[in-house]
Every structure is written in C-alpha cells, then in structure tokens.
Image: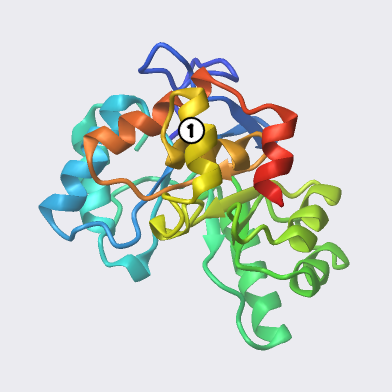
Amino acid sequence: FLEQRNYTKESFVKNDQPIPTQEITADVYLPNLGIGTYRLTPGAGTYNAIRAALDLGYRHIDAAAAYENEKEVGRAIGDSGVPTSLMDLGLDYLDLYLVHRPAPMLTQRMAIWSSFESLLLKKRVRSIGVSNYEINQLNEIINSKFIRPAVNQIYLSPFYQNIELSNFCKKNNIPVVAWAPLDEGRFLTHPHLVHIAKRKGVSTAQIMLKWSLQQGNTVIPKAQSYFHMNENMQLFHFDLTPADIVSISQ
C-alpha cells in the first residue's frame, strides 16, 4: 500500500469520510479498505482502474506478479502524483510484502520467510506478511525466532467465514486481510442480504464488505468501474447492528 506522509491514523482521505487504518507494525498503518488487482482487464484497463482508485482516495493496492499487471499498476502509481518516495512496479520500497502462498515443504517456507526478513532489515520493505497460510504454517513462524507476520491475507466472506483460522489470527495479533470478500458476486441476490440492504439504503455488496470490516478485518475487493470503487468508499457512512452481524453469520 502507498503510505502518504503527514497523515493521521484515520487519513487516506479523498471523500468526506476517511478510510480507517490499523497499525500492523510500528508506525505502519494499513487502510482497512483496499482494491484488489486480480483479474483486472490487462493494459489500459488496469492502468485506468488504479488511476481512478487513487483519485478517489484508495491507498491500499493489492498486487502480485502472478496477476501479470504489475507494470500497469506501477505506471498508474507513478502518474498519480501521490506524494510518496515512490522496477516492475517502479517503486523504491514496498510498505507491505506478502508471501503469496505457502511453499509445500517446511524448509522452503522457512527459507522464504528468512529472505523476507532480510528485505525488511535492508529496508526494501516496511512490513512483511503472508497469504493463504493455515494455522500450522503460522505456528511454524510464531514458534521460531522469526518476525511474526504483519498480516495474513485469506479467503473470507459471510459465506466462507474461515472461523477457526480467523480466530487464531486475532488471538495471535495477526490482522486478517480478506480477499474475495464478495465471493465473486455469487451471493449478491441473497434474500437476507437484500432485505438488510434495503433497510439500510445500501447495496448488498456494501453489506457483505461491512460485515467483514465490523469484525476487524481489512477488505480488498476487486473493482474496475468508478461506480463500484466509489460505492465501496461509502462503507464508512453506516453500520450494521450486532443483530445484523449475527444474522448474516448464520
């Protein structure tokens, strides 16, 4: 994510409501709403989407070499004028660098994490985390002398709650970043979500994202249209009741 200087903990402001952040390591704040770049239209589609997102106030961009669009993401960041010290991405450093998925062998996983620690010590990255790690793989790091992951990015939504893993992360102070928090749109017409959305005057997508946010998670939904990006930015104008959270969780 791109960290602007001279901000407050509730910064990253473009709309009238700031995106809340959480401190994941000392003086490194993660915006609780980001934008995923998986399956964004290649080329100009990715570039235009990221430029629009930055203009709206997004500062948390989830990218990966495997998505084959890092050059477009980097070019959009460079052209955006975002004031940061910002070669596929064209950046001097990364605020958060993740292991995309765990390697099959323990020795491989430990070697990879050791190399991530080296990047942190060399100040090429400001924090390091993991993605798609299960409890046993997290324990390998926690029980070693290695630095604990700053986050674990996992598949999590109202329809795939990943409760045991999510609770483990929270118990061990590893913030959860939810990828596919909208379940690729499969449940946007679910009657219960539609009912709550109508009562709140928002969309079912906003209900699904808010469900994750109010449980302390960060969400990184993919969005390519300006409309959906802007809609997601309005998540901080309303709250679900505790009863809503329970009913969605059932």
Query: For residue 56, which quarter of the picture?
Result: top left
The location of residue 130, given as percent across then percent down, is 62, 61
Q: Residues within 10 Å of mark 1 (few under 14, many from 20)?
A: some
> Is any atom of residue 1 visible in this view?
no
Q: Which residue is mark 1?
A: 197
Residue 14 percent coordinates (x, y): 36, 18
In the image as oriented, which residue stretches furthest toward the bottom?
Answer: 105
Compared with residue 85, is residue 163 higher up or lower down, i.e. above or below?
below
Relative image position of residue 190 (x, y in whole percent): 48, 51
Q: Position of residue 208 (x, y in %)?
A: 53, 43
Classify residue 199 as left or right of residue 71. right
Kindly identify the amino acid type of the residue bearing the numbered disc 1. Answer: Ala
Q: Residue at x 64, y 32 (%)?
A: 22
Judged left or right of residue 249, residue 200 is left
Is residue 213 positioned above or below 134 on the image?
above
Which residue is found at the position 74% from the left and 55% from the top?
166
Using the rendered view, name the quadrant where residue 203 is placed: top left
